[in-house]
């Protein structure tokens, strides 16, 4: 059965319904009961701090979006302005309050828009480059949201095993529930571009080149310290033992859309390479002098 045809109208309808179905989570809705704060802190301090920082970087993410997409579409604007922004900020507030409850310092968001994005944004006033920027935006968003779903799922499970049901069910679970809708928006948007043949062969080639040469995992932002911190998150959650499984989970959409001709590819190799580099950095085996992922950076 062929996939349903995605139109601007259907994507807009999905986005508006997403906002109605998932309003921002009120800070007061959380049961902040923690049975053993020291145990939670010992096991998940790095993970909670990392997640809080990433969720609170929404203002910078919007600036990056407006830099990369000077001609942002109506549907994209509705999504980030009326749905995604308030939801993600609420996630950040909840996690940051959890940090404080655990006796940790508040998160310190990274707020600098990298030069490489400003350069690409300057070129994006030319429509063919704008289309490449849009596809990169959707692919980055999709992989980021899949990473979030997996991480939050594991964190919920592990907190419940520790008997910390209150924070698992009233903080982490509500956050996790909102991430699949974000993923679906990015997925549908990328699929629509492919379906409508918005991307010419040379544009797909450039997109593949840029993606493979500049890919980073969620929250890394080409900062070595963040890459090391992410390695700590992967290790705290036990994901360092199943990196290929994780790479497949977060990279399969990209394998399908960008690398469809490479038969048998479960995920692009740069996903697993980035995961391994992050864990190596955390274990003290990585090279702080080399560029992130040892690839050319724009």
Image (cartoon, grey):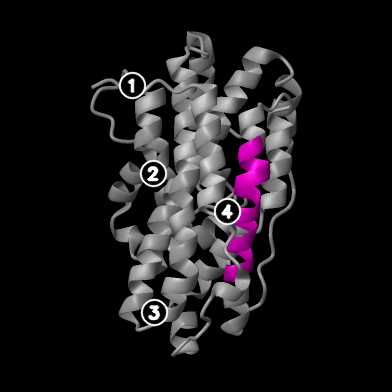
Instruction: Find numbered disc 2 in the image and state the secondary structure of the residue it sits on.
Output: helix
Image coordinates for residue 221, horizontal then vertical, percent: 61, 47
Q: Disc 2 designates what residue?
A: 250
Viewer-proximal residue among 97 and 14: 14
Instruction: Find numbered disc 4 in the image and state the secondary structure of the residue it sits on.
Output: loop
* Rendered view: 250 above or below 162: above
What's the distance in space between the residues labelled 2 and 1, CA to CA?
16 Å
Which residue range is magenta in the image? 78-95
Q: Disc 1 designates what residue?
A: 260
Image coordinates for residue 273, horizontal then vertical, percent: 40, 43
Residue 157, image quadrant:
bottom left
What's the distance in space between the residues labelled 3 and 1, CA to CA?
42 Å
Q: Which mark is residue 288?
A: 4
> At x 52% / y 10%, what residue is drawn?
202
What's the distance in space between the residues labelled 3 and 2, CA to CA?
27 Å
Q: Answer with mark 3 or mark 4, whichever residue precedes in sequence.
A: 3
Q: Answer with mark 3 or mark 2, whichever residue precedes in sequence.
A: 3
What's the distance in space between the residues labelled 3 and 4, CA to CA?
39 Å
* Rendered view: 233 above or below 72: below
Viewer-proximal residue among 257 and 266: 257
Q: Which mark is residue 197?
A: none
Question: Tags 2 and 1 in contact by the CB under 8 Å rule?
Answer: no
Q: Residues within 10 Å of mark 3 (few under 14, many from 20)?
A: some
Q: Is residue 91 left or right of residue 273?
A: right
Q: Residues within 10 Å of mark 2 (few under 14, many from 20)?
A: many
């Amino acid at each position: 059965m062929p996939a349903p045809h995605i139109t601007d109208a259907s994507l807009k309808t999905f986005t508006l319904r997403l906002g109605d179905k998932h309003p921002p989570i009120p800070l007061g809705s959380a049961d902040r009961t923690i049975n053993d704060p020291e145990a939670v802190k010992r096991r998940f301090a790095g993970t909670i701090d990392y997640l809080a920082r990433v969720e609170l970087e929404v203002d910078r993410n919007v600036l990056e979006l407006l830099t990369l997409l000077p001609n942002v579409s109506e549907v994209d604007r509705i999504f980030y302005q009326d749905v995604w922004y308030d939801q993600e900020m609420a996630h950040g507030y909840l996690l940051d309050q959890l940090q404080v409850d655990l006796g940790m310092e508040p998160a310190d968001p990274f707020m600098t828009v990298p030069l490489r994005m400003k350069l690409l944004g300057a070129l994006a006033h030319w429509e063919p480059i704008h289309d490449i920027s849009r596809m990169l935006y959707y692919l980055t968003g999709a992989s980021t949201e899949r990473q979030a779903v997996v991480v939050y799922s594991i964190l919920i499970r592990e907190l419940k095993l520790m008997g910390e049901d209150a924070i698992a069910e009233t903080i982490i679970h509500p956050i996790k529930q909102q991430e699949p809708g974000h993923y679906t928006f990015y997925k549908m948007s990328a699929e629509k571009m492919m379906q409508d043949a918005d991307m010419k062969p040379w544009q797909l080639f450039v997109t593949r080149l840029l993606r493979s040469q500049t890919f980073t995992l969620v929250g890394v932002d080409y900062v070595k310290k963040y890459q090391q911190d992410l390695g700590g998150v992967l290790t705290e959650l036990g994901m360092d033992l199943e990196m290929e499984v994780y790479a497949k989970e977060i990279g399969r959409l990209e394998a399908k859309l960008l690398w469809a001709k490479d038969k048998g590819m479960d995920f692009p190799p740069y996903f697993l390479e980035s995961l391994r580099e992050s864990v190596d950095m955390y274990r003290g085996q990585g090279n702080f002098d080399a560029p992130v992922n040892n690839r050319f950076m724009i």
